[in-house]
């Protein structure tokens, strides 16, 4: 066996460019596959974690006709679908009596427009809510840390970190014209001072998230745009323990059915399938790339091994004449293919492992607003034993199977033909 | 009879619609320990005859017996084993593996001889290295050797398995006459010392006359043997 391995290594060294190409392909394929498999796993787990922390314990009560799926909380509604003061008071009183519910508040969700920096017109998602309660009670929200706008402030808003830090729609402390919807759903223009934002820089990186929202105080917002009645688009509530949702939410639904039949309760768990789809999208995308790379790797190995066989016709003939069996010849070429792919894949694994370890230490700064919700900012991939096994298995299979066909073809050549070729 | 017995050996090749008769009912007896030359001009069937004996090609008709055994009736695996154990090959173009050095090239056929210990294999190789006078070049690759040296490596490789018969197809064709004679000297010496049957082909009269027996082929027929 030792002699055969020596012969393989010598032959691989002799066909330097070919060896290097296969090595690089195997390296690149293994690198990307290993990296993406582990990152995908990390995204899946992080997504579950984020979802659990951010959404699982929340629910909202709103009109039955409002479609909330795929809206991420910025849904469309007609003015007449808003919750009336009596409904809001009744619901809040009911929720206050539930020991599993830690708090609740009414909110107005809307889409607005701002003439921001350089008078640039930018759309935004607005949320008007009780800022005092937000700061005091709802600090478990991963994007709600430190906020200077106080309850009752009418002409102040707080854009999320992404709006002032990343998108640079507005600057802190400046005053801009905002187009905001009034009670009738008509847009009115108002001067609003951007007083501050979520304290992005002091937040733990893993907790940074949040879509491009602009936050207003609910009472202030109502007076700003001219609400004659304290209406809201929804009441949101928070469970102390998200695991009680399956027990508590049917009770709330029953209460609504009895007392407010035009309303419904929607668990924020409805986002779970959306996140699952996003992760699935990542999966499909990365696995397609992986599959293409592996296919290229296999095809090139087959092609280059075939070239190698054609070049070494005389050698095959000589070895056959000396008494080497067809199986010996096939084994020789298969072993060469295996060694080079295995070496390349091993190098790829090590490189990927190095990169994963580096990313684990440094974290990946992700300031994409939407994806921050899904995978978080500063996510740090790690190694997952099952992925290591799967990727190793894939490349072992490639290393064994890819050179097999040309090796078998080479071994079937007639001795006479191979000896005649020069 | 330990030699080679050939009876009614025919070989036809098809070139499109044309059938070329490379060998026409060849009958031959070659005794064990012979030092024989298959002579004849190009296209006379020398290589075809050696290929039949060496189990590299199959005859259209006829039989080849070595030490009484009809080698054409052997299975593919048995033929391979036969080539490995009974026959040795020397090629016109040496056919050394370029990635292996002198020692490794000579050692190559012994990879298949698992019954020999590493030490036995080493002794066999070194004995032949000395026999062909390449002690100083034992770690040289083929491209570092002259034509004559390469052919000596090929001879050593053919002998390392202790074959009964060595088949050499124009072993001196790529060598100058002095080197060719040196190679013949070596083959002759080994033939004398070990009793190995040497059957080589040539169309060079100078080489032919070195053989103990000349088998003359012309258009696939034995003219004189």
Image (spheres, helix red, strand yellow):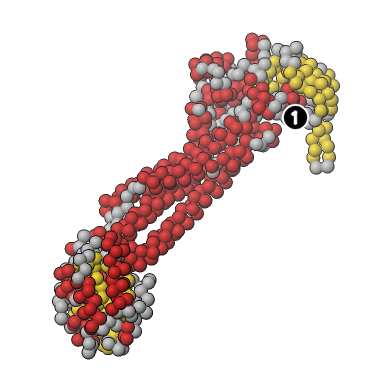
In this figure, which residue is indicated by the disc labeled 1?
Answer: B58
Q: Chain of mark 1?
A: B
Q: Residue at x 28, y 66 (%)?
A: A248
Q: Quadrant of residue A135?
A: bottom left
Q: Secondary structure at mark 1?
A: loop
Q: Residue at x 31, y 72 (%)?
A: A253
Q: Residue at x 27, y 53 (%)?
A: A362
Front residue of A8 and B136: A8
In the rendered view, tell whether residue A392 sits above or below residue A266.
Answer: above
Whether residue A243 is visible to the viewer of this picture, yes or no, is yes
Whether residue A158 is visible to the viewer of this picture, yes or no, is no
The 10 Å Cα crowd at callout 1, few under 14, some 14 to 19, many 20 or more, is some
Q: Percent x, y for residue B106? A: 56, 22
Quadrant in the picture for the C terminus of chain B = top right
Q: Percent x, y for residue A345? A: 44, 44
Q: How many marks?
A: 1
């Amino acid at each position: 066996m030792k002699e055969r391995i020596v012969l393989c290594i010598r032959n691989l060294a002799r066909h330097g460019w070919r060896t290097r190409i296969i090595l690089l392909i195997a390296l690149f394929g293994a690198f990307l596959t290993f990296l993406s498999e582990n990152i995908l796993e990390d995204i899946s787990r992080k997504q579950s974690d984020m979802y659990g922390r951010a959404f699982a314990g929340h629910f909202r009560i709103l009109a039955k006709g409002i479609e909330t799926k795929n809206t991420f909380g910025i849904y469309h509604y007609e003015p007449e679908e808003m919750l009336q003061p009596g409904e809001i008071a009744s619901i809040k009183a009911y929720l206050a009596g539930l020991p599993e519910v830690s708090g609740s508040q009414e909110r107005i969700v809307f889409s607005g427009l701002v003439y921001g920096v350089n008078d640039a017109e930018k759309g935004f998602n607005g949320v008007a809510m009780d800022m005092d309660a937000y700061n005091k009670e709802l600090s478990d929200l991963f994007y709600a840390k430190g906020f200077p706008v106080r309850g009752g402030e009418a002409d102040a808003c707080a854009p999320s970190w992404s709006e002032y830090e990343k998108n640079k729609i507005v600057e802190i402390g400046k005053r801009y014209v905002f187009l905001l919807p009034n009670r009738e759903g008509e847009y009115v223009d108002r001067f609003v001072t951007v007083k501050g934002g979520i304290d992005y820089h002091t937040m733990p990186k893993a907790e940074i998230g949040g879509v491009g929202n602009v936050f207003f105080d609910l009472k202030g917002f109502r007076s700003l745009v001219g609400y004659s009645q304290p209406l809201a688009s929804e009441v949101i509530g928070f469970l102390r323990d998200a695991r009680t949702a399956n027990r508590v939410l049917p009770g709330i639904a029953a209460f609504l059915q009895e007392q407010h039949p035009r309303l419904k309760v929607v668990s924020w768990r409805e986002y779970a399938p959306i996140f699952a789809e996003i992760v699935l999208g990542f999966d499909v995308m990365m696995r397609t790339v992986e599959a293409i790379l592996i296919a290229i790797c296999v095809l090139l190995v087959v092609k280059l091994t075939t070239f190698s066989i054609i070049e070494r016709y005389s050698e095959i003939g000589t070895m056959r004449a000396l008494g080497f069996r067809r199986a010996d010849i096939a084994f020789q070429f298969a072993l060469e293919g295996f060694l080079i792919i295995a070496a390349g894949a091993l190098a790829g694994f090590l490189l990927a492992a190095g990169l994963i370890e580096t990313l684990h230490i440094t974290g990946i700064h992700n300031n994409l607003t939407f994806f921050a919700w899904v995978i978080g900012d500063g996510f740090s991939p790690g190694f997952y034993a099952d992925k290591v096994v799967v990727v190793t298995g894939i490349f072992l299979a490639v290393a064994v199977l890819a050179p097999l066909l040309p090796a078998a073809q080479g071994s079937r050549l007639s001795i006479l033909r191979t000896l005649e070729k020069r | 009879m330990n030699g080679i017995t050939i009876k009614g050996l025919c070989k036809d090749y098809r070139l499109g619609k044309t059938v070329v008769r490379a060998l026409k009912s060849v009958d031959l007896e070659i005794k064990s320990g012979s030092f024989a030359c298959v002579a004849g001009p190009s296209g006379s069937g020398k290589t075809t005859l050696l290929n039949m004996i060496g189990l590299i090609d199959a005859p259209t008709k006829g039989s080849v017996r070595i030490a009484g055994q009809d080698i054409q009736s052997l299975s593919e695996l048995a033929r391979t084993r036969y080539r490995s154990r009974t026959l040795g090959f020397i090629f016109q173009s040496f056919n050394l593996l370029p990635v292996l050095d002198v020692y490794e090239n000579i050692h190559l056929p012994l990879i298949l001889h698992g019954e020999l210990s590493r030490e036995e294999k080493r002794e066999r190789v070194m004995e032949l290295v000395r026999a062909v006078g390449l002690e100083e070049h034992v770690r040289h690759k083929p491209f570092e050797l002259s034509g004559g040296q390469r052919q000596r490596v090929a001879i050593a490789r053919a002998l390392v398995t202790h074959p009964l018969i060595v088949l050499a197809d124009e072993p001196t064709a790529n060598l100058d006459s002095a080197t060719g004679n040196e190679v013949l000297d070596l083959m002759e010496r080994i033939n004398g010392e070990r009793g190995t049957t040497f059957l080589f082909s040539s169309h060079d009269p100078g080489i032919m006359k070195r053989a103990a027996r000349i088998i003359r082929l012309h258009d696939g027929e034995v003219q004189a043997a």
